Image: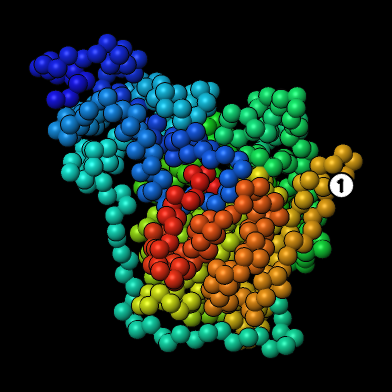
């Protein structure tokens, strides 16, 4: 029998502690509504205590939304084990919640419970809990009132599959044209002396308007080095002038230094800019804050790049609440029109009319066509997306491998790639997505940017990537008193890794060379972190997990890594990735 005393027919006495907790959190209906909001916060906060990993841990990006989500749910279940909720009662509670919200949603009361739960579960510091709930509560209740979760789905999530089906991650498939796929046709290498285009790639700038030199870089909040972070202990240095190796974003002067110092890396034929302009203070961002970031950084890019064409894509941090991109049928104050219209206005000088119409309608990837070849740019790489979306994208790439000349993403903040294979055997490399390092230091990285060399504009060009270079600002050197920032070339891909070219097979071969060549992998590990690797060494399990990630352009697909270990006994990759939200 359940012990929470919801029904007067209960014969099991309730403890004084349980009755006190009811008094603390409120009626069960509000408890579950607040629990849902607290769960959303745990997923959204960039460095919540539920997901936190020590700064010394290797900052591999968090992958597998279902795994991360389930880990949080498990913690919540454990925290509320005293509730002993039965399936019929759970469905009754959620039915009552849905009915109550549709009749008279009380956002403030739901928020009050969520704040208490956020503090109780230590999802974030108390002040962050307060601000985050107040930011998220309106949207959360609005979503709930639109019946995103049925009682069966909600209880399947909380109590397991015996009580319902939680299908937010269920499979779906796109329809591809019935026209047979042409035979694969690898691109021909450019003739000697053929034109080469240089593309500047900017991603994850994360400008922090409140960055303040000298403040505590290791504060309790999810983002530090800023007003409100306080001063560091007397034995520890404060945030550096140009940035800091910690959970900090960048001051405007560092981004201005990056853009003003591009000369040695240029000239550029175009710019790909894949989003995440605002800082990681997601618990306190307003629409005005996001629009200020958009207009300020857009003006800065235009100031220093002048007439060079810029092709931007939208990152998950552009909106507020973070990751909040309602579908186009949502109208009024809960829609994203405020953001899309501002982007269309800010980027109008760069984008054609058709792209502006698409931008105003919904968030999408940008494609750049060159004769019959296409480049795709986006923010979140396919291997980091929900499984069904990732697998369907994988199918599209495989179907159009002769058309797709390049894929360019950001989001993870580190320097990596994802190889695509034929779907029949998962053994023939047919495409590669390049994941460029971030401008921001978050977490404990040097600022950086990428330059791609592309087969240039001429009849018969393949428009594929020929090579790429990464540039960084060494913060240790830049933050020395009296020093001036010097952006330096960190490495070139073909030269450093001994690649014959930058085609998919070369990257596939590199992964398998790194499997046995420890020195080569350590070079990759150093460059993966933009020249500032963590002090904690990357041992064999870490190395295998990292290499598996380079083969995994399709989420939740362990078969892609089956050849990395002779006996097929790969380590649990999910357990090796710390829960940092690199987004």
548 sits left or right of 77 in the view: right
Where disc 1 sits, the SS reads loop
Residue nearest the viewer, comparing 61 with 361: 61
Residue 410 visible from this viewpoint: yes
Q: Give the number of marks.
A: 1
Q: Is residue 500 above or below residue 68?
A: below
Q: Position of residue 307 (x, y in %)?
A: 73, 62
Q: Position of residue 291 (x, y in %)?
A: 59, 40
Residue nearest the viewer, comparing 230 with 305: 230
Q: Is residue 401 above or below residue 135?
A: below
Residue 45 visible from this viewpoint: no
Q: Position of residue 404 (x, y in %)?
A: 51, 75
Quarter residue 286 falls in:
top right
Q: Looking at this rendering, what residue extends furthest in the right direction?
A: 482
Residue in the picture at 65% in, 32% down: 218
Residue in the picture at 37% in, 35% down: 75
Residue in the picture at 37% in, 49% down: 66
Q: How is the image coloured?
A: rainbow
Q: Which residue is mark 1?
A: 484
Quarter of the N terminus within the rendering: top left
Q: Is residue 32 above or below residue 404?
A: above
Residue nearest the viewer, comparing 49 with 412: 49
Residue in the picture at 46% in, 85% down: 184
434 sits left or right of 557 in the view: right
Q: Position of residue 135 (x, y in %)?
A: 48, 30
- Label 1 crowd bin: few (<14), some (14–19), many (20+), radius 10 Å: few
């Amino acid at each position: 029998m359940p012990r929470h005393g919801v029904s007067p027919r209960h014969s099991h006495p309730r403890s004084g502690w349980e009755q006190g907790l009811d008094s603390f959190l409120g009626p069960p209906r509000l408890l579950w509504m607040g629990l849902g909001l607290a769960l959303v916060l745990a997923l959204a906060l960039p460095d919540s205590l539920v997901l936190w990993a020590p700064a010394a841990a290797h900052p591999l990006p968090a992958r597998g939304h279902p795994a991360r989500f389930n880990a949080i749910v498990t913690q919540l279940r454990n925290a509320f084990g005293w509730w002993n909720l039965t399936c019929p009662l759970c469905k009754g509670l959620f039915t009552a919640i849905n009915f109550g919200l549709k009749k008279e949603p009380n956002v403030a009361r739901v928020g009050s419970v969520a704040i208490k739960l956020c503090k109780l579960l230590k999802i974030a510091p108390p002040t962050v809990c307060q601000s985050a709930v107040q930011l998220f509560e309106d949207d959360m209740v609005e979503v709930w009132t639109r019946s995103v979760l049925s009682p069966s789905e909600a209880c399947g999530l909380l109590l397991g599959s015996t009580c319902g089906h939680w299908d937010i991650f269920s499979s779906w498939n796109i329809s591809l044209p019935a026209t047979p796929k042409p035979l694969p046709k690898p691109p021909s290498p450019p003739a000697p002396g053929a034109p080469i285009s240089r593309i500047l790639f900017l991603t994850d700038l994360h400008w922090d308007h409140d960055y303040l030199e000298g403040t505590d870089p290791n504060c309790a909040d999810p983002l530090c080095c800023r007003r409100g972070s306080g001063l560091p202990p007397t034995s520890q240095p404060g945030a550096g002038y140009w940035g800091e190796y910690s959970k900090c974003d960048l001051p405007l002067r560092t981004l201005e230094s990056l853009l003003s110092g591009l000369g040695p890396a240029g000239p550029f034929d175009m710019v790909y800019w894949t989003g995440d302009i605002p800082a990681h203070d997601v618990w306190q961002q307003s629409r005005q804050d996001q629009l200020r970031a958009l207009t300020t950084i857009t003006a800065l890019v235009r100031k220093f790049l002048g007439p060079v064409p810029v092709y931007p894509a939208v990152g998950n941090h552009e909106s507020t609440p973070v990751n909040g991109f309602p579908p186009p049928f949502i109208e009024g104050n809960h829609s994203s029109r405020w953001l899309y219209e501002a982007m269309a206005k800010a980027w109008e000088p760069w984008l054609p009319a058709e792209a502006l119409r698409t931008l105003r309608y919904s968030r999408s990837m940008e494609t750049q066509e060159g004769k019959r070849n296409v480049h795709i740019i986006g923010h979140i790489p396919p291997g980091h997306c929900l499984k069904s979306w990732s697998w369907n994208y994988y199918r599209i790439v495989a179907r159009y491998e002769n058309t797709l000349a390049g894929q360019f993403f950001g989001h993870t903040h580190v320097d990596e790639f994802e190889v695509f294979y034929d779907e029949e055997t998962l053994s023939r490399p047919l495409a590669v997505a390049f994941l460029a390092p971030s401008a921001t230091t978050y977490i404990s990285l040097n600022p950086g940017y990428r330059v791609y060399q592309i087969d240039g504009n001429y009849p018969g060009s393949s428009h594929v990537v020929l090579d790429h270079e990464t540039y960084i600002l060494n913060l240790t050197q830049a933050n020395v008193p009296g020093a001036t920032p010097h952006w330096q070339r960190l490495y070139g891909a073909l030269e450093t890794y001994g690649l014959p070219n930058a085609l998919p097979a070369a990257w596939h071969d590199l992964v398998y060379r790194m499997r046995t060549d420890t020195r080569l992998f350590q070079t990759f590990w150093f460059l993966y972190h933009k020249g500032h690797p963590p002090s904690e060494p990357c041992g064999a399990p870490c190395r295998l997990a990292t290499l598996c990630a380079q083969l995994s352009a399709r989420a939740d697909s362990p078969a892609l890594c089956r050849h990395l270990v002779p006996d097929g006994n790969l380590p649990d990759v999910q357990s090796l990735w710390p829960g940092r939200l690199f987004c």
